[in-house]
Amino acid sequence: MIPAILFAAAVACNACGALGASLDLKSSNSSSCCSILHSKLGSKVSFPNSTVFQNEQNGSSGYWTQQEASLTPACRVTPTCTQDVALAVSIMSSRKCRFAVRGGGHMGWAGSANIANGVTIDLGALNSVSVSSDHSITSVGGGARWESVYLKLDAMELAVSGGRVADVGVGGLTTGGGNSFFAPREGFVCDNVENFEVVLGTGETVNANNYENRALFIALKGGSNNLGIVTRFDLKTFKQGKLWGGFIIYPITSAAEQFQYLEDFVTASGNGVDDYATIINSYIFLPAGPSFVANQYTYTKPEAFPAVLKNFTDLQPQLQSTMRITNLTDITIELGAGTPNGFRQLFGTATFGNNAGFFADMFALAEKVFQPIQSIADFQASFVLQPMPKSILRKSVANGPNSLGLTPASGNLVWLDLTLQWSNPSDDAAVNNATQTLLRQSISLAKSRGLYNEFIYLNYALQAQDPIAGYGPSNVANLKATSRQYDPEQVFQKLVPGGFKLSRQDTTCC
């Protein structure tokens, strides 16, 4: 029996019709998917000349990147409840219509959450946030963004393990694994899901948790958009008051000290010295070259300048500091301000062992690789080192299982996150080539020093990368078996081309 608490805060489905007997798909083969969808869902289907459509493409509800916004689907479906999603998927799977699914729309590359000439299901209206009466579960709609979750929970002095950028969607981050300010205490974001409500490729809606559909439950923890559309996440909730966090900006000349301090921090954190501290160690490149270091620190207690961060917080000179006692909403809004909507963007990533000398040598490679592209319009690049110590992996295993393949045996790790911004489509190839070159060179160097780990964090992956393969053969086999079990027609492999598929033939990088 499934504990009732998991479903106490189900998303309301007002004015939503169930899949009715009047829907005769077989007799509608001559009609377009959009026409059928519109006949069944009415104003919840929008077309390119409409205000709703344009707002979801480029307006206040638009995509993070120009690449995604540049794709024009034949129509967009904006469901207001799970039944709408189920109906839309039934129609498209029966008629073999290609479609995309958008949660927050924060994956950068074109086609990850949008589609040209197909149908885009935009989950943005599935954004409810409700807390169970005993405050143990927060139920979140599949189209919600983390800011709405934190606004609700901050007022109640509660929290969930979630994203670090306010505008990022709950769905993509969580099904991709998810890093968090609470990771040393709680593991990955996906490890804190108690239940997924999922629409399968047939249009059937199921719950996946430790008691029901457990294989699907595990697969969704890292399986991204390969198994179904998650319409509700039931998240473990805990008490959380104020915290201490913000940015400190340093001159780029402090880089060598920063690399050593980062190695020391990851080692200490891996040993369990203090599970309340996290660091995002960022080296910012502007048209003039490497310009400054922008470190984000969060300590999830309302205590300033904890000892575990002393090396960093004592380091001088400091060009600017925003460190303060505040709440989670405020911290995540600040962190998102550095990556605004409306530019061309890409991510690229790799995972390495914890070694200051290697960080320094990899940064030197970045200086050389980025130099030829620094003059392009609106260029900005972030060379970001994110700790992944054994403390996080221990908590992940304890709260798991998931599909990611990381365990404490992997050792103390650091994720490299490359984030590049520019404006002109004509520069796409140069930026992509530079990113792939840096990843290849860094991986080659790491392999020569025994510091390479094959894990690729899906939410930071370049389109040319294959993060699912980095989960390891056993996890990949389980994901494929679960896909065949729950999606026998392979709707989410064949009709949903976007995202990182379980079997890829088009990877070219790293």
Image: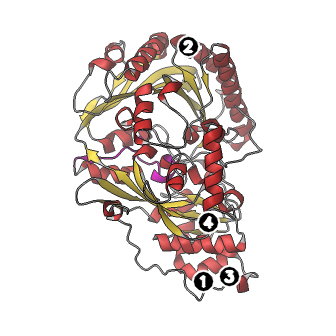
- Check contact, mark 3 vs mark 4: CB within 8 A: no
In the image, residue 440 above or below residue 176 = above
Q: Amino acid at mark 3?
A: Leu
Mark closer to the chain start, 4 or 2: 4
User: Where in the figure is residue 159, as x and y percent of width and height?
Assistant: 30, 46
Name the residue that disc number 3 marks. Answer: 25
396, 510: nearer the viewer: 396
Identified by mark 2, the residue type is Ala
Residue at 37% over, 32% down = 184
x and y percent of residue 88 in the render?
A: 59, 72
Name the residue carrying label 2: 360
Rendering coords of residue 509 (x, y %) = 72, 33
- Residue 167 lies in magenta, yes or no? yes
Q: Which sits earlier in the primary sequence, circle 3 or circle 4?
A: 3
Instruction: Count residues near mark 1 (Cα–Cα under 10 Å), then give few for <14, some for 14-19, many for 20+.
Output: few
Circles 1 and 2: CB distance less than 8 Å? no
- Camera-side residue of 496 and 282: 496
Three-letter amino acid code of the residue under disc 1: Ser
Which residue is identified by label 1?
Answer: 39
Q: What residue span does the magenta drawing correspond to? A: 157-173
Q: Could you tell me which secondary element the residue under label 4 belongs to?
A: loop
Q: Is residue 163 visible?
A: no
Q: Residues within 10 Å of mark 4 (few under 14, many from 20)?
A: many
Which residue is found at the position 31% from the left and 24% from the top? 274
Discs 3/2, front: 3
The answer, for residue 372, to whether it is visible in the render is yes
Q: Is residue 507 magenta?
A: no
Q: Quadrant of the C terminus?
A: top right
* Labels 3, 4: front one: 4
Which numbered disc flags the more N-terminal residue, 1 or 2? 1
Mark in the foreground, 1 or 3? 3
What residue would you read off at disc 4? 201
